[in-house]
Image (tube, rainbow, N blue to C red):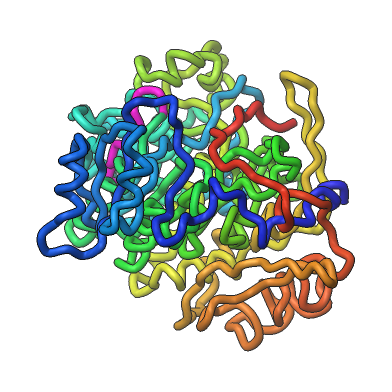
Amino acid sequence: MQAKTVLLALIGCITPALADDGQRGLVNYARNSEQVDVIVRFKASPDQSGHRRFLNHGAVHKRSLALVGADVYTINSRDLDLLAADPDVEYIGLDHEIRATSSALLPSTPDYGWMTVLGVSSPTASVSYDGTGVGVAVIDSGLPDNTNDLQDAEGHSRIVYKASFIPNVNDANDQYGHATMVAGLIGGNGKNSTGTRFDYTVRGIAPNVNIVSLRVLDKYGASTDSTVISAIQAAIALQKQYNIRVINLSLGRPVSTSYTQDPLCQAVQQAWNAGIVVVVAAGNDGRDNSQGTQGYATINAPGNSPDVITVGAMNTMGTLSASDDKITSYSSKGPTLIDHVIKPDLVAPGNRIVSIEAASGSYLVSTYPNNRVAQELYQISTNTGASGQYFELSGTSMAAPMVSGAAALLIQQDPTLTPDQVKARLMQTATRLPQITTTSVDPVTGFQYVSENDVFTVGAGYLNVPAALANTSKTTLPATSPTATFDPSTHTVTMVTPDGAIWGTGAIWGTGAVWGTGAIWGTGAIWGTGAIWGTGAIWGTAAVWGTGEIQGDSLMIATKGDN
């Protein structure tokens, strides 16, 4: 239990750079930049006096974010304090950089992660639903006009809409090579690997969904808050036209303020309220011990939103059986910074995952040609060399689309399901993981990482699609993720359920079920009655619950893969 000896501290101690600055939500910013982009929300003013004062100080208006009642400005960094003190400013924060939550790896045995989550033992097996009629918005690096594995039975592209939201960039194609992988895991039909020549059909969870591609990541996998918010705004506007019921966000950035103030988190909440299931990658910072937390409290935004489904990454060990699967060392862990939301919500395969390869000129494919899957590994023939059809990546970016595909199957099965009902059903039916410690070794550095299957690492458990499809429960209450609170007098960490939420006493799952009576895994369960880890519990001195500082501005660490 070494990881639980390092953290006695997150609640009640937030460094000022991370905490809300009064009502303004002012975040830490870089003064070494003369020009800085900020997101600003003004108080209601019929004469737009705040906006005019910004312009008078030389601010340049870049775009409006009506979804969250905000605007984006470029300002001189020396004016930030002055503009933040404007009486009409309700919120001001950096237009943060966002990145894809995946990493290129040297390939080993291909991992067809969908076979694990579908509970099948054959590479060509299928389930009775395929996502037909359901639209999934992939907010990522863009998609090509057509690719064989994203066609319908008649050969028509299931990419029904595509657009770029990157400022001054109209090209909606995948120049980075990430979204093609994500879309393949959600809805690839395996056309390029189906037939008598193939051992494996490389397909997605819901192989007949329609894909709405909204490009936000540039050629190098980077974006901004405002760009992603604009795409979420568009997904809501296109919802009825394309029956968009799911948004996949395989991207993120460090938490910088409370989700109640963060425009990015407010945007995903708006999508959720509009009836769209939002699935978000947890992040790849589980190895980050820079603050002495051993990777705890590293969930990325907007995965810190209590509404969305936040997904961590499992390593299937390249086998069809789930019995040897384990959590990846790099999967980000909860609780979330500042608000202490219990995340991730569940986990899914995300290590060395095989999916559709993007165009040869895309950044990932051209930079990491060794990640092309060897033909002999999925073809019966003796062909050698790298395939031009499939590619391999790791990260929570690859785990999130597994859950997005599963959500599409549930919605096809029952179109009346709400986002809360989908989330509750997926968490309720997730396979409970044993309370064990696992070890992973970085194949490049040889460094050893130890992970525990606690609630802040694996959430409710491992995605189980057959169990979710067999479930018929339909909660009428919100499935808002609970928060954790630390009691310094008893050294216990307990769960606090939001008003009216489904967790806790009298919950739809009952005592001893997923969350149970006042405890994460139920009364008298692994971590003790009424507490996550029981009395005397756990966590060290300075980082997550107490007086230590946690910096929230580090980018994801590179994921080298787990062995």
Residue at 50 percent across and 47 percent down: it is: 256
Q: Where is residue 204 shown, x and y percent of the image?
A: 45, 44
Main structural element of the magenta stretch: helix, strand or loop? loop
Q: Is residue 110 above or below residue 96?
A: above
On the question of residue 230 being in view, the answer is yes
Q: Position of residue 180 (x, y in %)?
A: 38, 33
Residue nearest the viewer, comparing 397 with 156: 397
Q: Looking at the picture, does residue 176 appear above or below residue 506?
A: above
Along the line of sight, the residue nearer the viewer: 417 or 47: 47
| Quadrant in which the C terminus appears | top right
- Rendering quarter of residue 171: top left
Please tell me which residue lies in front, 410 or 80. 80
Furthest residue in direction top, as rendered: 385
**Would residue 319 be seen by someone viewing this image from the given angle?**
no
Say which residue appears at 45% left-offset and 71% top-offset: 420
Magenta-drawn segment: 212-221
